[in-house]
Image (tube, grey):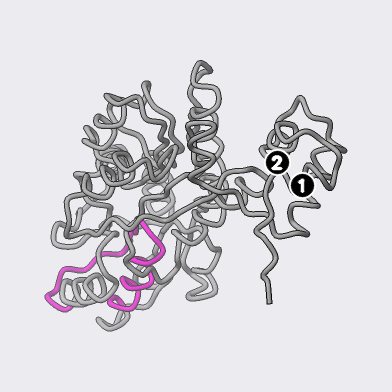
């Protein structure tokens, strides 16, 4: 039995009576093609199972219409990363672009995965997070004029596209909230200080603690990016050794859940012996422990913005870079 041939642009052109270049532009969402024509072409392409040939696309256009998201494959309890991916994928829906995930392992040189994508032309643009103040990935991409967008800022933020969460505002909100509740000895499990947003959070928290006249202890042996088992054990050990806090700040939902477990193992009651302030993306923490106070970090919006920012650099490199900072709002 003879298999049906793979649908091509020519197949769609024959079915619609349109020229092949018109079909190609309609599938890519070109704005100079009428909306009715675009919808008709895209509907037929979906019905017949048309899948673009990436090698052919690169030969014709110099692009493969792929955006690569570089992420650590480590599992997250609250899965901020899943929401970031969802946002990016949703923004690419009904476009010619596809999203691929490129793993960047924590125990490997982060440049390895990035160089593979760039040097093999595996994608037209990349998105990545966990930015350093002077991030070698950013420097590498700017030197090569390769389109990219970062979740997080750097010291060169004026030169690249990014979406960021204002962690300085988060830290100040947290300190003010806990101080207003009468808490005077506050601990913070923050992101690693080598990461841009970790430095930003710790600096702002330190300054605000002085302004509020409260004691602040920055945990040195554990961060909000560490595995939950490590955070839980570190918190329980610290409390059991006699170091007590009446307020705690956590830089992620994962670390908050683990830290609260450690606090409770040490016999502390959340909302009575210690008040807890955290950020999260899934509106879950108050269901986990109602007394926890949290502010929102919108990972869906971040992912969608970064995908659009990457496309803008590919298609309109002469336009201003897309840049946005999310300002946390206390609920």
Q: Which residue is mark 2?
A: 27
Please determine whether, in this image, residue 61 is positioned above or below residue 268. above
Q: Tell me the element at label 1.
A: helix
Q: Position of residue 240 (x, y in %)?
A: 16, 79
* Residue 140 can be seen in this image: yes
Please rate how many residues cluster around mark 1, counting C-alpha atoms within 10 Å: few if below 14, some from 14 to 19, many from 20: many
Asked whether 111 or 75 is in front, the reply is 111
Q: Position of residue 150 (x, y in %)?
A: 39, 39
Marks 1 and 2, Cα distance to the nearest angstrom?
Answer: 10 Å
Closer to the observer: label 1 or label 2?
1
Q: Tell me the element at label 2.
A: helix
Q: Which residue is mark 1?
A: 12
Please determine whether, in this image, residue 203 is positioned above or below residue 112. above
Q: Which mark is residue 46?
A: none
Q: Residue at x 65, y 58 (%)?
A: 6
Q: Position of residue 266 (x, y in %)?
A: 25, 81
Please rate how many residues cluster around mark 2, counting C-alpha atoms within 10 Å: few if below 14, some from 14 to 19, many from 20: many
Which stretch appears magenta? 240-263
**Residue 325 part of the magenta segment:** no
Asked whether 229 or 235 is in front, the reply is 229
**Residue 257 part of the magenta segment:** yes
- Image quarter of the N terminus: bottom right
Q: Position of residue 208 (x, y in %)?
A: 31, 40
Image marks 1 and 2: residues in contact by CB distance under 8 Å: yes
The quadrant where residue 33 appears: top right
Q: Residue at x 40, y 73 (%)?
A: 270
């Amino acid at each position: 039995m003879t298999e049906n041939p793979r649908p091509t642009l020519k197949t769609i052109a024959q079915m619609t009576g349109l020229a092949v270049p018109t079909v190609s532009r309609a599938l890519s969402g070109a704005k100079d093609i009428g909306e009715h024509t675009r919808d008709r072409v895209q509907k037929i392409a979906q019905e017949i199972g048309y899948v673009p040939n990436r090698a052919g696309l690169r030969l014709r256009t110099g692009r493969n219409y792929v955006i690569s998201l570089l992420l650590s494959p480590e599992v997250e309890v609250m899965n901020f990363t899943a929401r970031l991916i969802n946002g990016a994928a949703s923004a690419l829906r009904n476009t010619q672009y596809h999203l691929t995930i490129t793993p960047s392992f924590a125990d490997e040189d982060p440049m390895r995965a990035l160089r593979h994508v760039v040097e093999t032309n595996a994608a037209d643009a990349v998105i990545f997070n966990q930015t350093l103040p002077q991030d070698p990935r950013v420097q590498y991409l700017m030197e090569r004029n390769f389109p990219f967008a970062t979740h997080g800022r750097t010291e060169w933020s004026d030169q690249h596209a990014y979406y960021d969460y204002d962690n300085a505002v988060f830290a100040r909100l947290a300190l003010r909230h806990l101080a207003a509740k009468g808490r005077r000895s506050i601990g913070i499990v923050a992101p690693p200080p080598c990461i841009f947003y970790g430095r930003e959070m710790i600096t702002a928290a330190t300054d605000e603690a002085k302004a509020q006249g409260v004691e602040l202890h920055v945990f040195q042996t554990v961060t909000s990016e560490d595995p939950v088992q490590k955070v839980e054990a570190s918190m329980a050990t610290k409390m059991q050794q006699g170091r007590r806090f009446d307020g705690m700040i956590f830089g992620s939902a994962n670390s908050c859940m683990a830290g609260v477990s450690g606090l409770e193992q040490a016999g502390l009651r959340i909302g009575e012996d210690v008040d807890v302030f955290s950020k999260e993306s899934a509106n879950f923490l108050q269901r986990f422990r109602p007394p926890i106070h949290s502010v929102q970090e919108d990972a869906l919006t971040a992912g969608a913005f970064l995908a659009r920012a990457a496309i803008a650099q590919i298609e309109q490199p002469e336009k201003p870079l897309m840049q946005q900072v999310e300002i946390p709002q206390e609920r």
